[in-house]
Amino acid sequence: MEAFADNRKARFDYETLESFDAGIVLSGQEVKSVRNGGANLTGSYLSLAGGELWIKGLRIAPYIKAGKLEGYDPTHPRKVLLRKRELASLAGKTRQKGLTLVPFSLYPRGRHIKLRFGLCRGRKAHDKKEKLKARDIDREVQRGDDEH
């Protein structure tokens, strides 16, 4: 499963407590643009408003072959599709101090485009340093195994 767009920095900046997959409402030309690699998740976030979940800051470039699109905003908020029960659960969890919803990737499932996001807690600077150290140690151990 090759992702159309990844938010790799989010996995480093946040500790994932729970992961979710959801549909996303896109227009036809946006779907074509995403499939051609025109989506960018960097700086995007999810928010609950009016009992619905929205992704904001997701940039989808205009589809090149669509011609001139009057009034198209590449970063307009897009609705994320979840069941009411899941939305209610997420609303309760995001009210807890320090928890937020962070988008991770856009990927295909059949002919649909899905959004993978997580309920996350922000990492402190010292946590990030520890993660980098652990990764370096694992890399060194792996190199040592390869030499023998």
Image (cartoon, grey):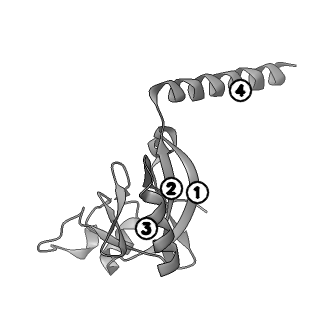
Whether residue 83 is visible, yes or no, is no
Element type at marker 4? Answer: helix
Q: Cα distance, mark 1 to mark 3?
A: 27 Å
Q: Cα distance, mark 1 to mark 4?
A: 25 Å
Element type at marker 2? Answer: strand
Q: Cα distance, mark 3 to mark 2?
A: 26 Å
- Residue that mark 3 sits on: 35
Q: Residue furthest left?
A: 70
Counting residues from the N terminus, which is met first, the one under dot 3 or under dot 2?
3
Counting residues from the N terminus, which is met first, the one under dot 4 or under dot 3?
3
- Residue that mark 1 sits on: 18
Q: Do the residues labelled 2 and 4 touch (CB within 8 Å)?
A: no
Q: Nearer the viewer, residue 67 or 116?
A: 116
- Residue that mark 4 sits on: 138
CA neighbours of label 2 inside 10 A, class few (<14), some (14 to 19), many (20+): some
Counting residues from the N terminus, which is met first, the one under dot 1 or under dot 3?
1
Residue shown at 27% from the left, 67% from the top: 77
Q: Position of residue 21 (x, y in %)?
A: 54, 68
Q: Position of residue 141 (x, y in %)?
A: 76, 22
Q: Which of 106 and 93 is in front in this view?
A: 93
